[in-house]
Image: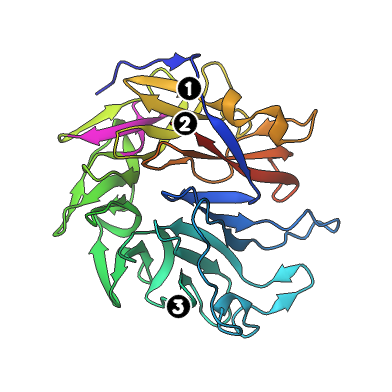
Amino acid sequence: MTADASVSVVLPAYTITKVSLYGVNALNESGGVAGWFGTPPSPSGITPNDTAAWTSGDAPPLAPPPPGQDPLLSPSNCPSGPYGTVCASHASGINSAGEVVVSVTGSPAGLTVIHYGPGSATIIPELLSATAIGDTDTVVGQTLTRHAGVFASGLLVDLGTLGGATSVANGLNAAGRVVGSAMLAGDMATHAFLDDGGALIDLGELGGGTSAAWAVNDSGVVVGESTISNGETHAFRYADDQMVDIGASSGTFSSATGINNAGLIVGTFVPPNSPNDGRHTHPFLYSNATMFDLWEIAARPETYPAGEAVWCCNGFVRINNHGQILVALCDGDSALYHTSDCWGVVLTPPE
C-alpha cells in the first residue's frame, strides 16, 4: 500500500547542537546520544578501531564504573596495539536514565555486550550484539545462536525466527514489544517482525520480497524499510495490520529508522534524480503524510569547516518524544573508512 506523500521544501524551525562523536546510534529523552569515537585517519592506511562513547544531554552523567572495573579498559579483554585496541566497540542504545548498552567485536576474552549503569559495567555474555536498551534495563539484540533476543532481569529470551536460521531485534517500546528482522524458511529473504509477547508476527513486505523493522513507538506503530517490486527500497509505516509505503515519492531509496509517540517518523532518503552512492543521502522527517527534507537544517555550514563537501549519515537518524532529531554528518571521502571527519547534530524544535 502506498501513502500520499511528497518531499517538501518547507523546513521546520529547529535549533542545532553539535555532538562530538564519530558515529551515532541512539537518542534518549534528555538529548543524550550513544555512538562511538573514531580514531583519526592513519597515514599507513591501517584501519584503527572504534571506541564506544556517549553523551548525557541535559541530564547529569552517570557515575562511571569504579577504577579498574570497566571491561573495555581491561588489557585482558581488549589489549592495546599500535593503532588502538584490538576490540572495536559501539554504544548502540541509551535509555532515559542515561544507561548505555555497548556492542564489542574482536575481544580475545569473548566480550560481546556490556551494560553501563550508574557506577557499574555488567557483561552480558548471553548476547552476541545489542541494539537497544529500554527504561527497565531490557536489552535487545542478537543471541549467540544468531536469533533475536531479549535480556532482562538476568534472563535471556530467544525470540526465534520466521522459519529461517537467523534473526535480530532492532528496537523496543515501553511495553517491551520488540521489532526487528528475521529469515524466512529457506533463508532466501528476511521480513520485518513485531513480537507480541508470544510469537513473532510477520509484517510482510511491499512487493520486493524483503523488509526490516527498525523502531516501534508505545502505540505499537512500527517503521522500517522494504524492497518494492522494481527493486527499490522504501520506508514503511506499519499500523492496523497494514504496511504503508511512505517513501514512494522520495526517490530510489528511503528507510525509516525512528518514530516517537506523537507518530513523527525520521530516517534517510535519496532525493529524486540523485545517485544512490552514499554521498547523496538526506535525513527526513515524516509528518502529516509529508516527507520533509532536513538536509539544509542538519548540514548548516556553522557545524563544519568551510568549503568541505558534507554527506550523511554515519549511524541512525533517531527522534525522541520531545521531537528532538539525531543526525550524523561527515566530510571527506566516504568511500574510505576513517578518512573523513564525522560528527552528530541534535535538532531541537521550538517549545
Residue 235 seen in render: yes
Q: In which quarter of the image is residue 215?
A: top left
Residue 147 seen in render: no
Query: Dot 2 lies on which element?
Result: loop
Q: Classify the position of the N terminus by image quarter.
A: top left
Task: Give the residue drawn at x 78%, y 35%.
Answer: 305
Q: Which residue does the numbered mark 3 point to in the structure image?
A: 123
- State if disc 2 and disc 1 touch (CB < 8 Å): yes
Q: Position of residue 58 (x, y in %)?
A: 51, 51
Q: Which residue does the numbered mark 2 point to in the structure image?
A: 349
Q: Where is residue 339 in the image (x, y as percent from the top left)?
A: 75, 47
Task: Give the residue drawn at x 48%, y 57%.
Answer: 92
Q: Nearer the viewer, mark 1 or mark 3?
A: 1
Query: Dot 3 lies on which element?
Result: strand
Q: Which residue does the numbered mark 1 point to in the structure image?
A: 12
Looking at the image, tell me whether mark 1 or mark 2 is earlier in sequence order: 1
- Please count the marks in the image: 3
Q: What residue type is labelled 3?
A: Ile
Badge 1 density bin: few <14, some 14–19, many ≥20, Cα 10 Å: few
Q: Residue 195 carries which label?
A: none
Residue 191 or residue 243, whichever sits in front: 243
- State if disc 2 and disc 3 touch (CB < 8 Å): no
Looking at the image, tell me whether mark 3 or mark 2 is earlier in sequence order: 3
Q: Compute the Cα span from label 1 to label 2.
A: 8 Å
Residues rendered magenta in the picture: 223-239
| Left or right of 297 in this view: 261 | left
Badge 3 density bin: few <14, some 14–19, many ≥20, Cα 10 Å: some
Q: Position of residue 326 (x, y in %)?
A: 51, 41
| Left or right of 141 in this view: 242 | left
